[in-house]
Image: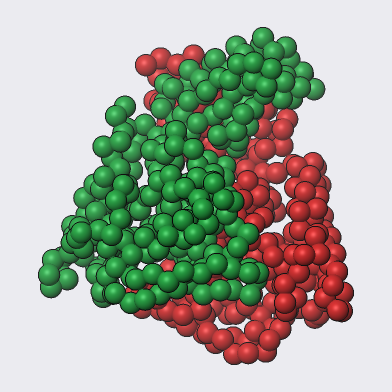
Chain colours: A red, B green
């Protein structure tokens, strides 16, 4: 089957979107379309140009024998701004307040178009950090973690509160929940993480950061490096936080009587410069 | 900013992949690229042709004033066959056997490229059913449910074993676990499902089908219609199953002493005809 340039461009875009952060060799495309490598190079220049025009990512070219291209998905400042504004307006209704200073977000985090966009936003900020795995705490953080991991094409490891029979032997640590001050246990299957790998921690909600701190300790226990920490919503009141160097998409403040709430941009937006 | 055809093709592909099962009007593209609708129509014919050549989906054209195109993502028979073969070889090691007739799948289901491909496979089979929401049981089924829901661009509803404070008021039902015969409770927040909507139920593992049956009852409780049931791995031994009309990707059999296992194609593959 012989492909025209126009058909190659469509399929190449499809292929690259499905293989982010992976080196794709010129030979791979050359064989896929029965075309000369010189034509493929020209095609890729067009793809690169179009991605950069829309701010949907960039193509990194790797020269040499094992050379090729790597697609790095990103989000433009314009899209990031629109997404955050949209999320703030969705989440700012007073009836979302739940007992204990929590926020009802199940509907928003149940919609893949939001979750995937949030994942792309977080991945943009950590695009050049090197990420080998994404870690989260069950259960609300799981969809966000997969959305981020999809962008990096790396595995997700889910930390659990109790050990499940389906997971084999596990490593467990105790941690102190920052807001409730209770001692809790978190576990991770022994075979989930390779020592030396770089871990990006992702979660949906953070008060003082006790759970996050527990996950950092767990990463140390597995001799891995925490390469980043991102949370969807953090609370403004609980201070000081038990952790540093994290990014939040949104920041929630609640009045003392828990009758009104305010949601504003967190720290992540300032990372988007163009 | 003026786009050339080649740049439009790349961005159009990107846009359609991110908006599956949604009507995109010709005007939307026409404004996005500052191009005449006639040019956009020609572009879309090329995109359609390329998608169909690779079996990565098809474009449905909707005529009239509110007309446009809808991208229906699909998987080709060739890709489905490769995916199932790959999964069978990954999961067929005897050391994956866990006490109680379970299978260690955490590593495979932790990899987004598998999860997203499984999601695309399930979505292909139910592409023309009409799906308004995807339902799953916490926690292992969650990534699969999001992968399927992403393809349909519909929300995910996660059924839980206990009511969480962050979810507001809930509806709960009791069900009998098919294999352990224990009475258990499942709950769903009251605001999660709209009466009359079509629900696709997705889960990672099924023995007799007690949990699935519980989810079907829950759908009835919410006055919704079950439009499909798909499971990643079902066991071959537990019979009869408590439910009908489901699709499984893989089927697991275990020897009586639980020392060896066999994994083979489930029911889903026969749905792929080209």
Tell me what residue is drawn at x 25 percent, y 58 percent.
B241
Tell me where residue A67 appears, x and y as whole percent.
Answer: 50, 36
**Does residue B212 lie above or below A81 as drawn?**
below
> Where, quadrant-wise, is the C terminus of chain B in this rendering?
top left
Residue A104 lies left or right of residue A199; in this view the side is right
x, y (%) of residue A134?
A: 55, 62
Nearest to the observer: residue A260 or residue B120:
A260
Q: Nearer the viewer, residue A228 or A137?
A: A137
Vertical position of residue A12 compared to residue B165: above or below: above
Q: Does residue A105 appear in this view?
A: yes
Q: Is residue A84 visible?
A: no
- Residue at 60% from the left image edge and 16% from the top image edge: B63
Q: Residue furthest left?
A: B256
For the point 50% across and 63% down, the residue is B159
Residue ID at (60%, 11%): B42
Residue A162: give x, y in percent of width and height. Answer: 46, 80
Residue that protrudes farthest toward the top in the picture:
B38
Report how many numbered discs are placed on residues in the image. 0
User: Is B214 on the left-hand or right-hand side of A83?
Assistant: left
Query: Is residue A17 shown above or below A104?
Result: above
The answer to whether residue B231 is left or right of residue B155 is left
Establish if B191 lies above or below A242: above
Residue A135 position within the rendered picture, expressed as x and y whole percent measured from the top left: 55, 66
Between A211 and A87, the residue placed more toward the observer is A87
Q: Quadrant of the N terminus of chain B?
A: top right
């Amino acid at each position: 089957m012989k492909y025209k340039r126009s058909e190659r461009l469509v399929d190449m875009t499809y292929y690259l979107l499905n293989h982010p952060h992976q080196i794709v060799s010129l030979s791979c495309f050359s064989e896929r379309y029965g075309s000369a490598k010189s034509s493929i190079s020209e095609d890729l220049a067009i793809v690169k140009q179009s991605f950069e025009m829309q701010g949907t990512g960039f193509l990194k070219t790797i020269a040499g024998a094992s050379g090729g291209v790597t697609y790095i998905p990103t989000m433009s400042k314009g899209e990031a701004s629109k997404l955050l504004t949209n999320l703030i307006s969705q989440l700012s209704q007073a009836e979302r307040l739940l007992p204990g200073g929590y926020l009802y977000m199940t509907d928003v985090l149940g919609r893949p178009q939001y979750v995937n966009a949030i994942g792309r936003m977080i991945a943009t900020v950590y695009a050049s950090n090197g990420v080998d795995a994404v870690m989260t705490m069950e259960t609300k953080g799981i969809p966000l973690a997969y959305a981020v991991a999809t962008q990096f094409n790396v595995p997700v490891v889910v930390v659990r509160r109790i050990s499940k029979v389906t997971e084999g032997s596990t490593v467990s640590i105790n941690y102190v929940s920052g807001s409730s001050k209770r001692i809790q246990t978190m576990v991770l299957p022994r075979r989930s993480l390779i020592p030396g790998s770089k871990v990006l921690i992702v979660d949906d909600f953070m008060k003082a950061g006790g759970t996050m701190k527990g996950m950092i300790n767990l990463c140390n226990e597995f001799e891995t490096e925490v390469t980043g920490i991102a949370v969807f919503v953090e609370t403004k009141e609980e201070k000081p936080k038990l952790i540093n160097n994290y990014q939040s998409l949104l920041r929630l403040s609640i009045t003392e009587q828990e009758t009104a709430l305010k949601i504003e941009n967190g720290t992540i937006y300032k990372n988007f410069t163009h």
